[in-house]
Amino acid sequence: MNSFRAAKTAGLTLGATLLLWLCFSWPLPRYMNDGIPSTPTRVEHETTRRMVQGDHLQLLYSYWLFADVATGQTPFYYNLYEFNAGDDEERRCGATDDFPLSLFFTPVYTLAGRALAWNLTGLLSLWLTLLFTWTLLRSRGQPVVWTLLAALLAIALPYRWSVLCGGSPTGLAMTWVPLFMLGLDAAIRREKMWGGLVAGMALFLAYLNDSHVFFFVVLIAPVWGLVVLLLRPDTPPWRNRRWWGRMIVACLPVVLVLGGLMLAGRAAQGDIVDSMGTHGRSWMEVALCSPWPRGLVARGGAGADHALYLGLVLPVLLLVGLLAQLVSCRYDPVRQWRRTLAHVLLVLSVSGIVILALGTRGPFDGYFMELVRRLVSPYALIRQPLKILIILPPLLAVLALLSLESLADLLGRRRALLTAGSVVLLATMLDYNSQIKPGVCLLDREQGAYAAVAADAKDAPRALVLPIWPGDSSWSSLYEHYVSLYHIRMLNGYAPVPPMGYSEKVALLHDPANVGRLAAPQIEDMERRGIEYIILHEDAFPEQVSSYAVAFTLHRLLIHPRLELLKQDENIWAFKLLKTPRTVLPALPDWPLFFPSRYSSFEIEHFQSDPSAVVREEGASGDHLLSLPPQGPTAMIGPIMLWQSHDTALLLRVRGNGSLRLELQDASGEITTNDVVVHDPDWRWERIPCPVRDDSATTITLGGQSGHVEADVLLVTAGQLPRVAVGESFSLAPPLFFHAGYTDLAHNAVVLRAESEPHGEIFYGPMLPLAAGHYSATLRFSTDAPVGTRLGTWNVAGGVVATQSCAVVAGAEARCRFETSPGSLPLRLSFDYLRQHDIMLRDVKIARVAE
């Protein structure tokens, strides 16, 4: 009989989970074997994109590592494939953080691959959450439909889907919250030791999987214990020693587990300190992650606001249920006072959780968050206030059922009330479902450049993957996925807290490789560590990585005498480090200039020595400029890196009548002085050549010499746009632009792939000033799309008199006419890609035309 009931419960909850999962996760079920969820709120019309960087890939890598160890491909308790500095023994670290769900992932991965294994593991965590919550609620003896719908709240809240689809370990670890509550309920209400064992096990699993889940479970334990005690059907025999003995024995496993973790030095505070630093998060960090209160009820929110969403239906139900319970207590206080107190305590707990989830945007400017941070020291280490919502779903499920129970007790269990309560809970589910729009990351099963490295290596392959980050950037999750395909040991990696010494000994030393610099210190370090390969992700190259677009880095790597191109597979390039320099360099397209990034542009007023010299003006870059009279304030920029190129120069936007002195001091202390004479009331660009003999850190100082001159912005450039007369034109090779996709060297073009690139402006440049005049900008392209298909929009903005745009349509010309004024700000051409078809961008032609 018990077996039949257990099977019935398992079947009912599994069926309900499947139905909810199909509705909430769609279209993921269509790509079960090909992709995994990457976001709960996609902004693109397309539902899938190949290899989207993010925490979902990092967590998948963690589960894959456990499976690889379990199947004997990787030594036990080793993570060899990231942050590997050459000594495998230094990479002894845990592969058990994802236990026990990784035990389910492993056999499915072995039989069917990582995408299906990952998706089924997520489904399993939802089912277990529902099963535990259902079992917890069944003891209330309410109608099955109410119990089931209330329990479904535990897996329907947008926060659960936010962390589950976003790849946070929290999404899977939240499974253990209702299990802990179930165990504690059995230990206190039924005085059963197995309940304490279950609660202790849940506490331990929460600790293994996610320190935040562990911390908040411990935080809510006393409150939940008191609620359970108040909801007992009988009055606790406070003076009965045997009762106290049974209670102590039942709860002892929880105390022992918690004490054991604390004694081991890895309890909640220790774990969070390890992962977040010893000084806690600053108030500003918390503010940046705090949602707006409108997110509680505003539909269609994004980010933290989306995860906070509760809607209107459920809070109204909880409020009505509380009023009903208060009325019942007034009529029958003797029988109802304990349940009323438990109900009020739950309402206050849920309200407190929501207030703390608002962080600095909570009532009274975040007073309650500040108070809790002072009183509970580990709380100061939490950056995302929303993390407290970890414990909200099962509490809401209990409170929703108690509210319906209170209404039934007050009004009677009429069929109309049963139907109305069910409709309210179902409406809540539908409301939450409308908030979830998952995006799917399609996974690569192979990658040619990485495969070439693995095939070429005589021993275990070791590589440096570019761009290199400090270690905590989600861009590196792409590297984790690819190295896992071929068991390549990577020098860099991705972790919330990188290994000790990584930042100084690895990231800082090899950061110049992001601009293609491989000098003797970097090469010697790579050889010492046994690293023979460099892999470049061309399309994972945001502006903060380098002073220039990726073409600058790619060009320097291709012509480096110690590197040989091993393989290009679309957006990824693999280079081999040669033992001796080569004498013959490859023939490359002519790239006469390189486009500066925003990190090569300096608003001079930000570097002034006297704030009173800053003047607000709408026509200036950043709407401010710096006044530089003689003997007045100066501006000191740097030290900044000046990278060697064939035409390094500074472009300074100035106006006025007088002169400036510009000094460049390199790392050796040598100073080069340039006097800039200005006689123009309108803005103009002054070019100051600064040939760089070797890549060097340089400090730039700017001050007035005579007259009165105003300075706006300084650009560090590697070439300039040509000046052309009316009727003349020049071309810019697409690889020079900031772009997604990949470079086709044979055609000197950029290829954008509909399956892989994001929707939006993913091709732009040159971010350089253009002489005053009338121009046309033509984007030449080819595509296999049918004639008349719209592929995107060609835009001209920045540095022009009026913004212009035109549709990019297959079989038609994409040309915009525009005008620039004297001394105009840097020109920005961009292509807004619609992801309808693949497209090859072949040329950007700028022609001077008559007015």
Image (cartoon, helix red, strand yellow):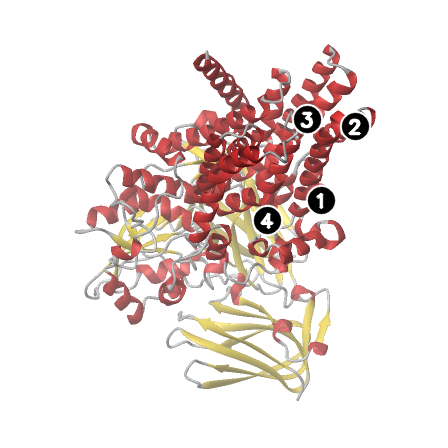
Which comes before the other along the chain, label 3 or label 1?
Answer: 1
Which numbered disc covers residue 293? 1
Amino acid marked by disc 2: Pro
Label located before the other in sequence (1 or 4): 1
Q: Which of marks 4 and 3 is in front?
A: 3
Front disc: 2 or 4? 2
User: With respect to residue 457, does 161 lie above or below?
Assistant: above
Residue named by callout 3: 402
Q: Is 108 located above or below residue 535 in the figure? A: above
Q: Please report contact status of discs 2 and 4: CB closer than 8 Å, yes or no.
A: no
Determine the CA span between mark 2 and mark 1.
36 Å
Q: Is residue 244 visible?
A: yes
Q: Which amino acid does label 1 sit on?
A: Pro
Q: How far apart are marks 2 and 4 (CA)?
A: 72 Å
| Residue assigned mark 2 | 333
Q: Which residue is drawn at 37% across and 75% down?
A: 694
